[in-house]
Amino acid sequence: MVQPGPTAPAGPSPSRFPAPSLPRTARPVPPEADPVPIRSAVQVPAPTSTPQRSRSRRSGDARGGRLWQIAVGGAAVLMLLGLCGIGGALLLIDRTATDGPAQNGAAPTPSASTAPTDQAAAGPLDSRDVDRQPLTAKEVFPGKTLVVGVDRHEYQVLKTQAGANCAEAATGEIADLLVTLGCSQVVRATLRSPDGDHLLTAGLFNLTDLATAQRVRDRIRPLLDDRRGRFRGMPAGDDTESVATAAARVAWQVRGHYVAYCLVTRDDAGAVPAGDRAVREIIYDLIELHLDKGVLDRRAAAVSVDQPTARATGASATPSAGTRRTPTASPRGDDPDTDELPGD
């Protein structure tokens, strides 16, 4: 039995020709390098262009922010102006709707804030520049008989006169006042009362404008009280001299650029009591009903048909008790001023 021999080692078989052994040489050792110092922090300078870019970017951002704020603020202002404009337009529409003509038959409601005052009101008779046509005697006293009021009081017209010399109808400083303030004409008449017991002279002075007429009105009373002038009655023939010489009651009133007046005496030249009912009735008939609501109303309508009748004056006196007139003030807020004239 054959026994197995030793197992050959793994790997290549040894060379049959062994290499000669060479002496071992030492490997060169490189010299040690200098140690590198270790720093705790290293500062690296930034490029010079970097901060400029940062600053320009920041400034650009700031400008952009300001522009945005300006844009937002401008938009807010425009919105506010628009709201104000809308509010103003609504207010204008509301006022127009309030002050305009009535619609659907409804009368407009007057507003207290827009109601004209006496000083602001302008009428067709407030200036001679508008009311240019002179008065005539026929316009003021058209016939031989003057019928006044609903009671049909009949006054006999004895004489009429229209002239440019206003001083003829007054004396003293009242005559001077009329001339100085530009009175251009006086139209007057002498009449006998319906009861036959009184004579009167009544008429209109034509001044330049409303303000001038009011100045004349305001100066008349102190001049009368100081006996520095008076209105003059106009005699109309026999048995009428008392109208120029006797004691009288006189009244005056402003309407536009006119001053209306009326002087009343007793036919027998006697004294005229302050509370004489007949005298008060004559003054009311001639000044209020005839000259104002008759002559001047017609004249105002002829001057301007489209404008309301001007009634802005400023007299303050009211009729005394006993007058036929029931209202406490005339419709235009101007009652005749009255005073007593002593006889010559």
Image (cartoon, helix red, strand yellow):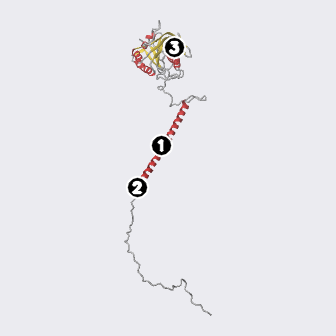
Which element type, helix, strand or loop, lies under badge 2? helix
Residue at the top extreme? Answer: 238
Which element type, helix, strand or loop, lies under badge 3? helix
Instruction: Give the amino acid at mark 1.
Output: Gly
Q: Distance between the residues labelled 1 and 3?
A: 68 Å
Instruction: Give the amino acid at mark 3.
Output: Glu
Residue at position x 44%, y 11% from top? Answer: 244
Query: Of tags 2 and 3, which is closer to the observer?
Result: 2
Disc nearer the start of the sequence (2/3): 2
Residue 8 position (above or below residue 291): below
> Which residue matches tag 3?
139
Query: Which numbered disc covers residue 74?
Result: 1
Which element type, helix, strand or loop, lies under badge 1? helix
> Which residue matches tag 2?
49
| Between 59 and 273, the one nearer to me in the picture | 59
Residue at position x 44%, y 50% from top? Answer: 60
The image quarter in which residue 44 lies: bottom left
Question: Residue 93, position in %: x, y?
Answer: 54, 33
Disc nearer the start of the sequence (1/2): 2
Residue 14 position (above or below residue 222): below
Label 2: few (<14), some (14–19) or many (≥20) C-alpha neighbours in 10 Å: few
